Amino acid sequence: MTEFFPEVKKIKFEGPKSRNPLAFKHYNPREKVLGKTMAEHLRFSVCYWHTFKGTGADPFGPGTLLRSYNDSSDPMQVAEMTLRAAFEFYDKLGVQFWCFHDRDIAPEAPTLVETNRRLDRIVKLAGKLQRDNGIKLLWGTANLFSNRRYLAGAATNPSPAIFAYAATQVKKAMEVTQELGGAGYVFWGGREGYDTLLNTDMGRELDHLGTFLHMAVDYKKKIRFRGQFYIEPKPKEPTKHQYDFDAAACYAFLQKYDLVDHLKMNIESNHATLAGHTFVHELEFAVANKIFGSVDANRGDLLIGWDTDQFPTDLYETALAMYTILRGGGFTTGGLNFDAKVRRQSVDPVDLFHAHIGGMDAFARGLKIAARMLKDGTFAQFIKDRYKGWDTPFGRKIEKGQATFEQMEKYTLANGEPKVQSGRQEMLENILNEYIG
Ligand code: XLS
Ligand code: NI
Ligand code: NI
C-alpha cells in the first residue's frame, strides 16, 4: 500500500519539554480535564477541502502545493488516492473526525447521474477507510458555490431550476452523510447573498432560503437522518453581503422561518472577525441563546480583509473560546474542525502536520487554561457580584416582569441617585494574563 506521508510517523504526546516539532506538547488525548479526556472535550476534525484539495492558489498566481496523490490524469484515480492519503493523515495525526463537501471527495462529471455514481464509489471507499481507521464523520455538506451554475447563489438564486438543482445536490449530500454515520450536516451559505440591490429581490430570496431549509428538514425526517443540522454564519465573501451575516442575523432568520428547533450554529473564528466581532462574542451569543453547535477553528489576519483561514495559534482566543464552550456544557454532536489552510509558501506535505499539531496544541492549552478559570471561579464570582442587585426582592420582581414604570419612579424618588460600581476591566485582564502565562 502506497504511503503518502512516509516522512511522518504517528504523532505522539511528548509533553511541554519536548523540542520535537512533530510531537504534541500539550494535547494528550487520554489526559483527563474536568472529568473528560482531552479527546472527548475537543473532538478535533480535519477538513478535506483546504487540507487535501487546497493548492495554494491566490488571485495573483496558481497553486504551489504539489502532492503525490494528485499525480494522475484520471480524476477518479486522484480522488481515490487523495482519500487514502487523507485517512493516512488522520491516523498519523490522531484525530477522530473529518469533514467534507460532496465535490471535494469526488469530482463532478458531465451529468448529475454520473456525478452521483462517482460520489457513491468514493463514499463506499470512505466507509471502509472509516471502519479500518476508527475515524468518524463530524459533518458533511454540499458545495453549492464553485460550479458556474451557482454564480447567483443556490437556494437564493433568481432561477427556480437552479434552486431545484441545489436541492437535488443537498438531498444526495445528506444521504451520503447519513451513510457515513455523520454526526451533523452543515449549511454554509456559499453565494447566498448579493452584490448589488439593483438586481436583487432581497425579501423573496430570504423566503426562498427559509423554504429550502424546511425542505431539508422534511427530508431529514423522511430518511431518519439523526445528525444535527448547523448553519454557518459569514458576513461577506464571496458575495458583498452574505445573508447569514453573523450568529445574531442567523438566529433572527431561524426564528422568523420557524427553524430554531432544527438548526444550531457552526461558528467560524475568521467569519466572526470579518463580521466585526470577536470569535468569543459569536460563541457567547450562541451559548446564551442555546443554539451553539460546532466550531470551524481557524483565525484571520487583522490587516487583511478576507477569510485567510490561518491555523489557530493565539492562546487568548483558544482559552476564551474553550471557557465559553465549557460554560455552555461542551460539545455534544459538534467539535473543533480545522477549516484552515497552510500558507502558499508552506509547500511541503509535512507542513500540513505542523499546522494541525499547532492548532491542536493551542486548543489543548486553551482547554487547560479554561478549566483552571472555571475551577477557581474568579471571573464567575466577579460577574455574580456585579449583578447581585438583581438577586434582591426588588431586582427579582423586575426580572419576573412584575414591575411597572410607576413603581420604578416611586423607588427612584425614594432612593435618590444610585451608586455606580467599577467594572474593574484592567484588574480582570491582569488576572486573565496570569492564567495564560
Ligand atoms: C467558507 C466556509 C466553508 C464552510 C463549509 O468560508 O467556511 O468552508 O465551512 O462549506
Ligand atoms: Ni467554515
Ligand atoms: Ni470560512
Image (spheres, rainbow, N blue to C red):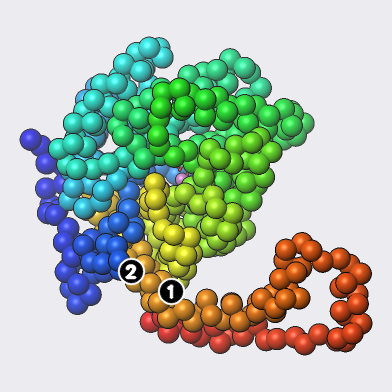
Q: Which residue is mark 2?
A: 34
Task: Report the side of 390 relative to 98 (left or right).
Answer: right
The relative height of residue 131 versus residue 357 in the rendered view (above or below) is above
Residue 36 percent location from the top left of the image: 29, 62
Instruction: Point out the residue furthest to the left here.
Output: 1
* Ligand 2 has an atom within 8 Å of the beta carbon of the residue at disc 1: no
Q: Classify residue 152 as left or right of residue 29.
A: right
Amino acid on which disc 2 is placed: Leu
**Disc 1 vs disc 2: Cβ atoms closer than 8 Å?**
yes
* Disc 1/disc 2 C-alpha distance (Å): 9 Å
Neighbor class of circle 1 (other Cα within 10 Å; few <14, some 14-19, many 20+) is: some
Q: Nearer the viewer, residue 344 or 309?
A: 309
| Disc 1 target residue | 374
Q: Quadrant of the N terminus?
A: top left
Quarter of the image with the C terminus is: bottom left
Residue drawn at 43 percent across, 55 percent down: 298
Element type where label 2 sits in the image? loop
Q: Kindly tell me whether residue 348 is visible in this rendering.
A: no
Q: Where's residue 254, x and y in %?
A: 62, 40
Q: Is residue 47 above or below residue 361?
A: above
